[in-house]
Image (cartoon, rainbow, N blue to C red):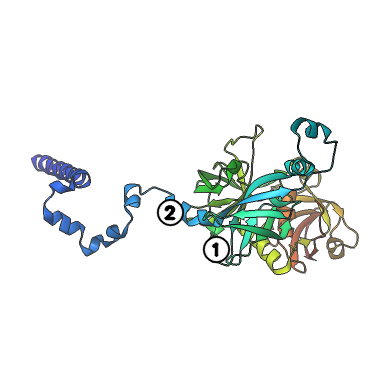
């Protein structure tokens, strides 16, 4: 017992001495003998010597991630022509504007953000930021200003691709591997809120694969509590390294202010849309020619769906002559899988079909008349939608 007490006393003393030494080395290194400085500047300490002082002072800073991404996030100024409506006499008499001045006063300007994604000057942004205009000014963080042209748009995902003609090298953001993005990850939202210029807000990934929000046709949003305010649309949502994980799109706010519920389009989806637009000028999606409806539990019982089947999509319409009809799909079929992927609702069915390229074969698992059927459908090209 005596030996154990002595050992405990010795261990506590060593721990206390090391703690005191650490505090002195941190706050008053000048009080330590020169040999201590020699040890801390040995080859084993080379990494510390090369680390910026700011990083040592604040090892938890996200400044390096912001520095990596901010140069590639641009401010957009979008000018739209006025709509011809109403008389302008009262404005002329009250303000004494010339007709030209009055016209200019009606010319509206909105602000948004974008992200440079290629050395050739391609910029990703939201479709709703640039729709109904061809007059777009792009301002870079280094002060350069360019006129941009629209390469293509995809209203169904609320994405657009712009391009600027830069004679000098452009800062380009790096796409993240979306398989490494998880709920709880720290993220930064970068954009041009309220026209204030480049701004950064921090938050976390609150949820993934948010859908059925009524924002766009195809939804698989990243939800975040990083502030996404007016003007942030089209900007970058980045990880703690500075890689792009999403294009900021919108926020949920009945009052117009930030309530901590923002949504970003996943970078993987944005990259796919961008590649198709650059290569072909449009986005091609698969199409089966069916009208789906989410299967409610009560309806599942009426249709004798097996008890272990947690969901599915009921076909309530089959287009005559379409791919589905040619493959033998019928009204009231229940689709539970596409290419081995479970289908729980109508949105998942539409999303899975949209990921197919025209001509691809889709293998559908179907419940019909209390029996399972495996049906192969050759996807067609989705007809152009008007917005």
Residue 81 is marked as none
Q: Quadrant of residue 144?
A: bottom right
Q: CA distance from mark 1 to mark 2?
A: 19 Å
Circle 1: is it few (<14), some (14-19), or many (20+) Cα within 10 Å?
A: some
Circle 2: is it few (<14), some (14-19), or many (20+) Cα within 10 Å?
A: few
Q: Is residue 235 left or right of residue 2?
A: right
Q: Position of residue 303 (x, y in %)?
A: 81, 47
Q: Quadrant of residue 96?
A: top right
Tag in front: 1 or 2: 1
State whether residue 68 is above or below residue 168: above
Number of callouts = 2
Q: Are marks 1 and 2 in contact (CB under 8 Å)?
A: no
Residue that numbered label 2 is attached to = 64
Task: Give SS at disc 1.
Answer: loop
Task: Give SS at disc 2.
Answer: helix
Indicate the quadrant containing the N terminus: top left, top right, bottom left or bottom right.
top left
Which one is in front, 31 or 231?
A: 231
Residue that numbered label 1 is attached to = 170
Q: Can residue 269 be seen in this snapshot? A: no
Q: Can residue 33 be seen in this snapshot? A: yes
Q: Position of residue 328 (x, y in %)?
A: 85, 62
Which one is in front, 192 or 185?
A: 192
Residue in the picture at 73% in, 65% down: 281
Residue in the picture at 46% in, 54% down: 67
Which one is in front, 245 or 232?
A: 232
Q: Is residue 21 left or right of residue 224?
A: left
Q: Position of residue 335 (x, y in %)?
A: 76, 55
Dot 1 or dot 2, earlier in sequence: 2
Q: Position of residue 89 (x, y in %)?
A: 83, 34
State whether residue 262 is above or below residue 51: above
Q: Quadrant of residue 279?
A: bottom right
Residue in the picture at 68% in, 47% down: 211
């Amino acid at each position: 017992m005596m030996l154990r007490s002595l050992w405990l006393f010795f261990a506590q003393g060593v721990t206390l001495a090391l703690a005191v030494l650490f505090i002195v080395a941190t706050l008053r290194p000048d009080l330590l003998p020169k040999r201590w400085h020699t040890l801390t500047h040995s080859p084993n300490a080379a990494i510390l010597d090369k680390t910026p002082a700011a990083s040592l002072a604040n090892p938890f800073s996200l400044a390096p991630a912001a520095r990596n991404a901010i140069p590639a996030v641009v401010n957009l100024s979008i000018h739209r022509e006025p709509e011809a409506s109403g008389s302008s006499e009262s404005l002329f008499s009250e303000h004494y504007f010339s007709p030209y001045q009055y016209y200019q006063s009606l010319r509206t300007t909105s602000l948004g953000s974008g992200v440079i994604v290629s050395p050739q000057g391609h910029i990703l942004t939201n479709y709703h930021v640039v729709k109904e205009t061809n007059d777009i000014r792009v301002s870079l963080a280094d002060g350069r200003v360019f006129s941009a042209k629209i390469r293509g748009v995809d209203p169904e995902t609320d994405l657009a691709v712009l391009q600027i003609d830069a004679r000098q090298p452009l800062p380009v953001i790096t796409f993240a591997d979306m398989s490494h993005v998880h709920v709880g990850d720290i993220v930064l939202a970068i954009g041009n809120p309220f026209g204030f210029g480049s701004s950064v807000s921090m938050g976390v990934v609150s949820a993934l694969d948010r859908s059925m929000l009524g924002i766009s046709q195809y939804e698989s949003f990243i939800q975040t509590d990083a502030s996404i305010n007016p003007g942030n649309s089209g900007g970058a949502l980045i990880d703690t390294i500075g890689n792009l994980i999403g294009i900021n799109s919108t926020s949920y706010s009945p009052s117009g202010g930030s309530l901590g519920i923002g949504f970003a389009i996943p970078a993987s989806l944005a990259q796919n849309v961008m590649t198709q637009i650059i290569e072909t000028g449009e986005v091609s999606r698969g199409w089966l020619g069916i009208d789906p409806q989410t299967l409610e539990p009560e309806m599942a019982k009426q249709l004798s769906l097996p008890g272990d089947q947690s969901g599915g999509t009921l076909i309530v319409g089959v287009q005559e002559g379409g791919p589905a009809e040619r493959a033998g799909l019928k009204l009231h079929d229940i689709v539970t899988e596409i290419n081995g992927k479970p289908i729980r609702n109508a949105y998942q069915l539409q999303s899975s079909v949209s990921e197919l390229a025209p001509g691809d074969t889709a293998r559908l698992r179907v419940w019909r008349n209390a029996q399972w059927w495996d049906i192969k459908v050759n996807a067609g090209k989705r007809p152009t939608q008007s917005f």
